[in-house]
Amino acid sequence: MRAGVLALQGDVPEHLAATGRLAGAGTPRAVRTPTDLAEVDALFLPGGESTTIARLLSESGLWKPLARRLADGLPVLATCAGLILLARRLTPSPSGPNPPTFGTLDVTVRRNDYGSQRESFEGAVDVDGLPGEPFPGVFIRAPRILEVGREATVLARRGDEVVGVRQGSVWGLTFHPELAGDPRLHGRFLAEARAAVERRAADARPQ
Ligand code: GLN
């Protein structure tokens, strides 16, 4: 199982470090080209500036191959700007034009909905099925999930608010687990991704 981190802009080193620290995860690959993408079985879509990442995805020739991999069930953990890029619906944001999106996750999202950089905050997050303490959520100019459609399932909440969803093997979080110093979400995502990849390989084998 090879994990990759989309490495065009944003908190790429933090995702590479968080994944690299996990026992048995191997060295994650920085994905910058369609060839890199073809060589990974699971992908982290980092936070950063969603409009910039969208532009760089087109310029690098990655947009179409990534759309195909998403349609084909690639396991993805998308954080913050990554979640914005996977959302099916974006509402207008006061902070300027929205990027184009892949439309994978059945959610409605508004960018920068908690305010500016100064309104960034940390807070406890309850993650479905995660044993132990609440997860330390780091929210940086975070998007807000305004609505969860029927195809998506709530994965994480902060109080009454939804801060994470999943749809099959694709997870979208408004916060940054790569900055939390807590490996549980990266670890669980990769364990599930590995199981999904092995199931597919077994299904593809001739009987
Ligand atoms: N505000 C950023 C955007 O709209 C997302 C913030 C982040 O990824 N930390 O792209």
Image (spheres, rainbow, N blue to C red):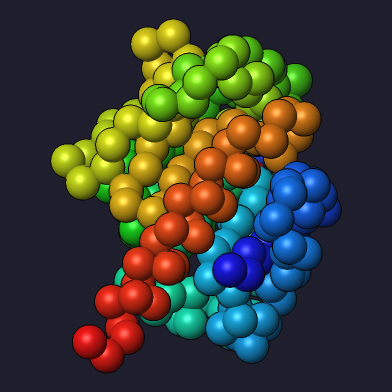
Residue 197 coordinates in the image, percent (x, y):
44, 67
On screen, residue 101 versus residue 188, left or right, reads left
The correct choice, above or below, for 3 with respect to 85 in the image is below
In which image quadrant can residue 70 be found? bottom left
Residue 20 coordinates in the image, percent (x, y):
78, 54
| Residue at 46% from the left image edge and 81% from the top image edge | 64
Quadrant showing the N terminus: bottom right
The correct choice, above or below, for 26 with respect to 153 in the image is below
| Residue at 67% from the left image edge and 25% from the top image edge | 138
On screen, residue 159 versus residue 207, left or right, reads right
Give the camera-side residue of 33 and 201.
Answer: 201
Give the camera-side residue of 130 and 66.
Answer: 130
Q: Is residue 80 visible?
A: no
Q: Residue furthest top?
A: 159
| Residue at 69% from the left image edge and 36% from the top image edge | 183
Q: Residue furthest left?
A: 150
The correct choice, above or below, for 19 with respect to 205 in the image is above
On screen, residue 122 versus residue 79, left or right, reads right
In which image quadrant can residue 198 be found? bottom left
Give the camera-side residue of 65 and 51.
Answer: 65
Q: Residue furthest front?
A: 207
Picture quarter with ligand 1: top right
